[in-house]
Image (cartoon, rainbow, N blue to C red):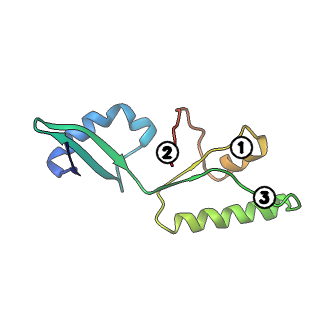
Amino acid sequence: MKISLATPEQAEQLVEWTAPHRERTGMLLGATVLCAANGNGPVTYMVTRPAIVIECLGPNPEAGHMELSKALYRLMETVKGRGVQVITFTGPDDVALERLAEHYGFERLSWQGWRME
């Protein structure tokens, strides 16, 4: 199996093969696309973008809502300024965290996720 960057000649096939995931992944702008191929040609494409996962927040229990909001805003701006294109936030079903996530433009994901460390 040979792994390489996808080529411009593979663009039409890439768009066709990844079409079922477009609603979830959006456009391919800024993506790095890898191709796994065997002797017969491409087997699969892997679309990647610089991303981080926010696994949890550790707010000071004495911090007020405005102070926490300002801190989160600054954290998000710092992360975005470092070239991160995708931010995924995982967390418990917590009404306060849900409101904050929605306020900062996070969308609720409808798909299951996995993690490897």
Q: Which mark is residue 59?
A: 3
Q: Is residue 15 left or right of residue 69?
A: left
Q: How many residues crowd mark 1 within 10 Å: few (<14), some (14–19), many (20+)? A: some
> Residue 6: percent from the left, percent from the top?
22, 49
Q: CA gap, disc 3 to disc 1?
A: 15 Å
**Which type of secondary structure does the marked residue at label 3 adopt?**
loop
Q: Which mark is residue 98?
A: 1
Q: Nearer the viewer, residue 102 or 63?
A: 63
- The quadrant of the picture occupied by the N terminus is top left
> Residue 48: percent from the left, percent from the top?
37, 50
Q: CA gap, disc 3 to disc 2?
A: 26 Å
When the figure is inspected, residue 6 is found, relative to residue 24, above or below; the finding is below
Mark before the other along the chain sequence, 3 or 1: 3
Residue at 17%, 44% (x, y): give it: 10
Q: Which mark is residue 116?
A: 2
Residue at 73%, 65% (x, y): give it: 70
Q: Is residue 2 left or right of residue 28?
A: left
